[in-house]
Image (cartoon, rainbow, N blue to C red):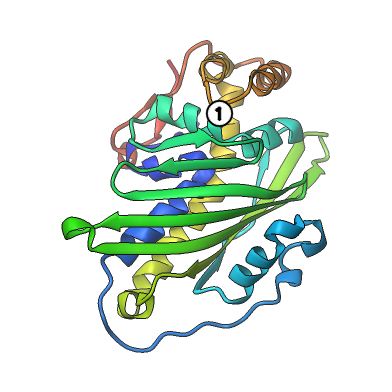
């Protein structure tokens, strides 16, 4: 079993907040340099715009069409029950609770409504985001990022992000259900003077965004594996999470029980401090 390492605390909240905060952090270290540019994308080729609520449609289209940065991760396939997979994708409060139980990190999140959340990393970076589309095959998140830091708060960064999760479902010849998904991120920096900040460090920003998008997909598949391998732990953590509704917690408990493996551990994952020393988690 491959588990999480302690140096990936930004993977919390299903990676949504991690992508935003990582982008913000690297922007704040950028300096002046050469020119910068981007290519436009037709929003209708990325997401089903007719299914996006009218009040969010223009913003989603603007971020996708006029993005500053864009990255799409490679497709990943892994065995998982579709209902359990969707429960982890749709409820970031439970996903974050599971992660924070394994690795200490200062990331905090609050549920603002049925589809909206806010969070911060405790170091000046904060984000609020809204699920503007939740469907079995496509999830779309519209997020607002803010960073205030530097001497006397002299550095301020604001950006909007559209995260898209495309998901497919199939069964192997042995009838085992599989998930295949990919994560795509569009970032539009709205701060005045962002070109000056981002010019020289654009390659670094793009590399970090590459890594975050890749890890976002891997993180979701990792959490599904941990949940079915350590069902008692997953259920206990989820049932204690106040930011998830009672109905959500009860549904998650039922799904975990239905997907419990015969060889499931009664304990919890143990996180190794240094993932390079071998497997990142082991059973206890």
> Residue visible at 83% across and 34% down?
175
Query: Is the residue 10 above or below the residue 65 in the image?
Result: above
Is 209 on the left-hand or right-hand side of 157? right
Q: Secondary structure at mark 1?
A: helix
Q: Give how far across and how far down residue 151 sits, in percent.
A: 16, 59
- Determine which quarter of the picture holds residue 276: top left
- Determine which quarter of the picture holds residue 92: top right
Q: Give how far across and how far down residue 40 sits, in percent.
A: 62, 81
Query: Is the residue 166 above or below the residue 190 in the image?
Result: above
Is 98 on the left-hand or right-hand side of 65? left
- Determine which quarter of the picture holds residue 64: bottom right
On the question of residue 39 being in view, the answer is yes
Front residue of 271/244: it is 244
On the question of residue 261 being in view, the answer is no
> Residue visible at 46% across and 54% down?
19
Query: Which residue was labeled with disc 1?
Result: 94
Is 198 on the left-hand or right-hand side of 47? left
Q: Quadrant of the C terminus?
A: top left
Query: Is the residue 57 above or below the residue 167 in the image?
Result: below
User: Which residue lies most toward the bottom here?
Assistant: 35
């Amino acid at each position: 079993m491959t588990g999480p390492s302690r140096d990936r605390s930004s993977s919390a909240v299903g990676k949504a907040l991690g992508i935003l905060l990582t982008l913000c952090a690297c922007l704040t270290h950028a300096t002046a340099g050469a020119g910068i540019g981007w290519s436009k994308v037709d929003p209708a080729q990325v997401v089903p715009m007719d299914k996006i609520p009218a009040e969010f449609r223009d913003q989603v289209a603007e971020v996708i069409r006029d993005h500053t940065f864009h990255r799409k991760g490679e497709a990943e396939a892994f065995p998982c029950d579709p209902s359990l997979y969707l429960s982890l994708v749709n409820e970031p409060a439970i996903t974050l609770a599971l992660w924070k139980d394994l690795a200490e990190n200062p990331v905090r999140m609050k549920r603002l409504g049925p589809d909206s959340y806010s969070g911060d990393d405790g170091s000046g970076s904060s984000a609020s985001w809204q699920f503007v589309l939740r469907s079995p095959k496509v999830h779309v998140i519209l997020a607002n990022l803010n960073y205030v830091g530097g001497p006397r708060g002299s550095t301020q960064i604001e950006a909007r992000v559209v995260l898209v999760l495309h998901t497919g479902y199939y069964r192997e010849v042995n009838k085992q259900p599989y998930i295949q998904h990919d994560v795509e991120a569009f970032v539009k920096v709205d701060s005045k003077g962002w070109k000056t900040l981002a010019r020289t460090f654009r390659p670094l920003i793009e590399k970090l965004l590459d890594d975050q998008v890749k890890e976002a997909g891997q993180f979701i598949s990792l959490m599904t594996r941990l949940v079915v391998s350590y069902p008692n732990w997953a259920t206990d953590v989820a049932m204690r999470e106040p930011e998830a509704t009672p109905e959500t917690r009860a549904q998650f408990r039922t799904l975990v029980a239905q997907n419990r493996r015969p060889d499931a551990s009664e304990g919890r994952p143990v996180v190794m401090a240094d993932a390079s020393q071998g497997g990142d988690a082991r059973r206890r």
